[in-house]
Amino acid sequence: MTTDPTIDEAERHKAKMAKRKAVQDAEVASKSIEKGVLLVHTGPGKGKSTAAFGLALRALGHGWRVGVVQFIKGAWTTGERDALRMFGDQVSWHTMGEGFTWETQDKARDIAAAERAWAKAKQLMADPTIRLLVLDELNIALRYDYLPLDDVIETLRNRRADLHVVVTGRNAKPELIALADGVTEMAAVKHHFAAGIKAQEGIEF
């Protein structure tokens, strides 16, 4: 009698996946802590803010209120801002920056804008109806010393227990990385901008 190799392969696969499921289920069952997490999206690759706004969309789908504070980006129109504003009062969106430092060319003005943004961020952290707060490009404000790092770290450390915070931007400070519950570094493997493809609506903004 000839054994059908496809049946043997199917059985081996089924047994392998059963073992994998047992390991996975045990791993999931071992996690019992529920708390607001601090996530950091950093690195030179594209997608840091994009990932944060994807998370915001997920939170909105669960009926959460979401806050967004943009520390560097200016008031130009972006697809994510217009899309999330369709959720009305469920989103509290604040674009506080005046553009990148090479555009403003005025450090005092940049510091003042960052300070206003940080004050707004603190206000949203104190709002018990906000479940997720996106601090877009806060890392850049910290990199250029627009804000006191100690104050940012202590404020994030002492935020209320159920608040989730996502911080984006290149060059995250080591102190912030140490404090965070999760850190993702976007690697710059390849970027279309280097090939002469301009920033385009729907892709970059």
Image (cartoon, rainbow, N blue to C red):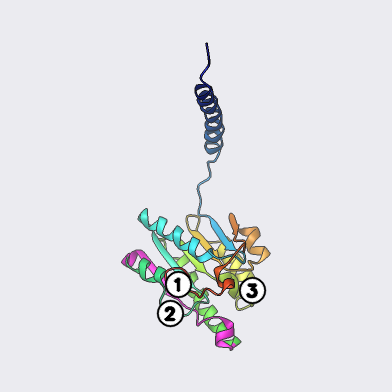
- Name the residue: 64% across, 70% down: 150
Magenta-drawn segment: 87-106
Q: Is residue 64 left or right of residue 12?
A: left
- Point out the frontmost of discs 2 and 1: 1
Image quarter for residue 141? Answer: bottom right
Q: CA distance from mark 2 to mark 1?
A: 9 Å
Q: CA distance from mark 2 to mark 3?
A: 23 Å
Badge 2 vs badge 1, beta-carbon distance below 8 Å: yes
Query: Closer to the camera, 176 or 101?
Result: 101
Q: CA distance from mark 3 to mark 1?
A: 23 Å
- Amino acid at pointer 3: Arg
- Amino acid at pointer 2: Trp
Q: Mark 3: give few (<14), some (14-19) or many (20+) Cα within 10 Å.
A: some
- Name the residue: 53% across, 30% down: 17
Give SS at disc 1. loop
Give SS at disc 2. loop
With respect to residue 140, does 176 lie above or below?
above
Image quarter for residue 31? Answer: top right
Name the residue carrying label 2. Answer: 76
